[in-house]
Image (tube, helix red, strand yellow):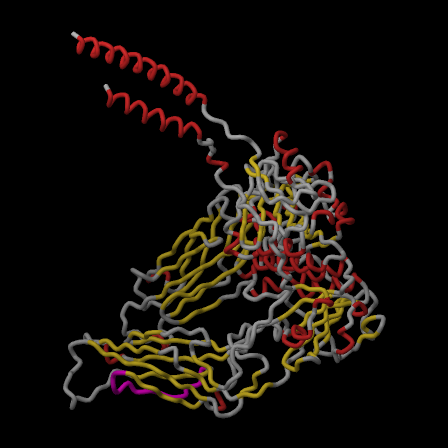
Amino acid sequence: MVRLVRVFLLFSVALGLFASLPMVSQAARTSLNPISATTAAAPLNQATVTPVVTDSDTVTFAQLGAREDSMEGPFNARYINIRLPNTWKLEPGAAITLDFETFVSGSAVSSEENVQFFAGSMDVQFNNVQLERIFLDRSGPRQVTIPISATAYTSTRIDGAHTLGILLDAGLNCGNDSQTSVIIRATSSLKLPHTLGTLSTDVKQLPRPIFQDSPLEPDVATIIVPNNASAAELEAGLIVAAKVGSITSSRIQVPLIAESVLSPTLRTESHLIFVGQAANFENLDAVDFAEGSGAEGFNLSEAQAADGIIQMATSPWNQQRVVLALSGNDDEGVIKAAKAFSTGNIRASSEPSIAVVAEVNSPDVLTKTLNLQITDVPSTGLTVERSFRSLGFETVSEFGIGGHTFELNVDMPSGYEMNDDGYIEVHFAHSALLDYSVSAMMVRVNDRPAGSIRFDDTTAQNGVGRVPIARGNLNVGRNRITISANLIPNTPCVDPNLAGIWYTLRADSMIGIPVRATRGRSVVLRNLATFLEPLTISNTLKNLAFVVPSDDPASWTVAGQLATALGDSLDPAFVELRAVNPEQVASVQANHDLILVGQAPDHAILQDPALQPIIPAPFAQGSKHPTLGNSRVVYRIPAELSLGYLEFMRSPWNEQRSILAVLGSTDQGVQWSGNALTTSRLRTRLNGSLAIVNDQQISVEDPTVTGDTAGIANDALGENQDDPIYREVIPPTKPEWILYAIAGLLVVMVIISVIVIIQAARKRKQRRI
C-alpha cells in the first residue's frame, strides 16, 4: 500500500508540472528573436570594386577556369577558350607550357627497359593552327614548352576569344587491350606577352568592352544617374540595370548610384554608364566625347531635340576604362537611349562612337515569336505552328564525342493558355558511326524533360522525331527549349578529329502549341521566396512599375539591385518597365505590378484605405515600423532601430497585379530588404508574404492581423517605447482535460488516504489485543 501511495504521489507531481507548462501551438513555435535596442547601423555599402586577377604575362590553366583533366585513348580532345581582357594586345613571344603525365596499361605493355615505348601522340593547336605534335614515347610526368606562331594569333571566333586545342591520338591501342591515358595538369600555363592598349569605343560592339567575361580581368561597372534624377531618368537607369542583369547573369555587382556617391576610387577603377540628361551631370564635362556636351546638353548636328543619344569614349580617369553616356536633351530622349541599349543591338551613326535614336518601337503587344493577333484565336482555340527558323534558329552542326546542347526561346503571350498538349518536331541528321544503344537526343522544356528520341540507321540522313509538350509546361512569358544530343561512337577506334562523329539540327524543325484565350481568372501565387515569377509574366517587363522617392538615392540603389535580378531571371530582348515617384503612383497602379522601395512614410499609397484589408502588416501614419499584430511575441522597437520589411500582396485595384513592398526603417534597413530578395542564400529562407530582416537574420511572420492583438501591437511599436523587453500578446491557455484529470486525481488521493488511515487504525488495534 505504501508503494501504491508513492506511485500516485509521483504521478500527481508530474501532472502538476505538466499542467503548469504553457501550451504552444505548432504555428506559434517560430517567432522573431529578441533584438537589442543598442544595435548600431553600419554604413551603407553602395558599391565594391573587384581587383584585377593578374596583369602578368604568364597565366595558368587554373586561372582560365580549366581543371585538371584526363584524356582516355584511343582518341580524345580537350579545348580551352581564352578570353583576354580587351586592353591586352598580344606581342611576339607567346608560348604554351604543358604539364602532363602519361599512363599506359594492358598486357601488351612490356616492363623491360630495352623495349621501345610508344603510346601515341598529342597535337597542340591554337586558333585551329597546328603548333606541334608531341610523341608519347615515355610514361610519367613531363613538361613541354611550345612557341605560338604569329600566324596563330588571330581568333577564329565571333566573340574574339582564342581557342587552345589538345588532341590525343592513341590509335595503336585499337586491336589490343592496351589503354593510353594522359592527364593535363592545371599548372600548365600560357605565356602571353602583351601591352595595354586603349579600348574600342565603337558602340556597335556593346556590351563590349564594358562586359567582356574574361577570367583575367573581372568586369567592374557602375550605373550613374543625376543627383536630382527625374522619374524618367530613374526609369531609364532601371531599364539599363535590367539589361545589365541579363548580360551578366548577375555574376558581377553593377550598382546604380547617384552621381554624388561616385567616389574618386570608383570613378578610376570602374567602367562608367551615365544615364540621364547630359546637362544634369558634373563629371561628363571632363570626358572627351566625339560630340561634346555643353550647358544645354549634347550638340549633335544630326540629332533632333527629342532624340536619344548614345556615346562612348575613353575614360579620362583611367585609359583602360570607358565612359558610356545614355542621354538626351530631355527625358524623352533619355528613355529612348536606354531602351535602345536594352535591345543589345546598337547601330552607329557616321561616327562609330555615337548612335542617335530617333524612335523606339515596342515589340508586338503579344509576342514577336508566335506572331499572334487577338483576332487570330477563336474562342475554341487553335494550334500555332512555327518553324525553328521563324524563331531565329538556323541549321547548325556539331562535331565530337559527348554531349552537345542547342537552345531557343519561345514566348507565350499574356492572356493565352495551352488548351491541349503541344509538340516539338525535331528534324535532324547524324553520323552512322554512333553506338545507338547509348546515343540519343533529349528535349527539355523549361528544364523539365519532355521526351527523348533514339538514333538508328533510318534517322542518320533525314531523322524526324516528335515529343509532346504537356499542357501547362509552357508558362506565360519566356520559355526555354533545350535539345541535347549525346554522341558515342560504336567503337573507340573512331577518330573524332576526322569529323567522323557529328550531329545536325535543322532549322525546319517545328513547334506546335494549341492556344486559346485564358478562361476565367488565373491564380497568382505570391510568395517572397519566388517573388520573380508573378513579376516577370511580360517578357519585356512592360507591366512592372518601380515606385521610388525622388530624394532617396539609397532606395535607387536597391531598386537597381531588383531590376538587375529581374533582368537576369527574364533575359529580356527589350525592356519596357516604368518608374514613378510616390506622388505619381496613381498613373500606374491600375495596370502595373508595383515595387515600392524606400521608407514607409515616403509612400502615401500605404495609407490608402483600399490597401488596409490586404496589406500583411499595415503602417500607422508616419511610422517607419509596421503593426505586427499576430506575432506571438511583440517587441518594443525603438524608432531609430534599423530593420527591413518585405511585404507581398495583391493589388486592390487589379486582382491580377501584385504589390511588392521593399521597405526599411532606415537606409540600411532598405538595403537589408533588397539583399534578402537578391541574395540566393537569404531568399531561400523567405516564405509567405511578410518578413522582417535584420542583416542576415530573417523572420517570417504570420501576416494575419486580428482585432485582439492590433491594439497591443500598436502600443508596442510606439515611438516613446524604447524598452527592449518583450511581452506575450496572448496568454497561453491550457486544455480543459487537465483540470478534470487533476480533480479526479485529488478524489483518488482522498480515497487512498482514507483507506490508509483505516488500515493503520486496524493494525494498532490488533497490536493492543
Q: Position of residue 416 (x, y in %)?
A: 59, 44
The N terminus, quarter of image: top left
Along the horizontal axis of the image, is 461 left or right of 620? left
| Magenta stretch encompasses residue 385 | no
Along the horizontal axis of the image, is 499 left or right of 703? left
Q: Position of residue 473 (x, y in %)?
A: 49, 47
Q: Nearer the viewer, residue 594 or 366?
A: 594
Please tell me whether residue 593 is drawn above or below residue 312 in the rendered image: above
Q: Quadrant of residue 755?
A: top left
The count of marks equals 0
Q: Position of residue 538 (x, y in %)?
A: 62, 51
Please tell me whether residue 462 is drawn above or below residue 371 in the rendered image: below
Q: Position of residue 746 (x, y in %)?
A: 37, 17
Outermost residue on the top side: it is 769
Name the residue at 68% across, 56% down: 555
Q: Quadrant of residue 228?
A: bottom right
Q: Main secondary structure of the magenta part?
A: strand
The C terminus, quarter of image: top left
Q: Nearer the viewer, residue 158 or 320?
A: 320
Please tell me whether residue 253 is drawn above or below residue 621 in the rendered image: below
Q: Is residue 544 visible from the viewing direction of this image?
A: no
| Magenta stretch encompasses residue 133 | yes
Name the residue at 82% across, 71% down: 297
Q: Quadrant of residue 119?
A: bottom left
Along the horizontal axis of the image, is 346 left or right of 143? right
Q: Nearer the viewer, residue 715 or 107?
A: 715
Name the residue at 31% across, 61% down: 438
Q: Is residue 223 visible from the viewing direction of this image?
A: yes
Q: Nearer the viewer, residue 664 or 144?
A: 664
Looking at the rendering, the stretch of residues picked out in magenta corresponds to 128-140
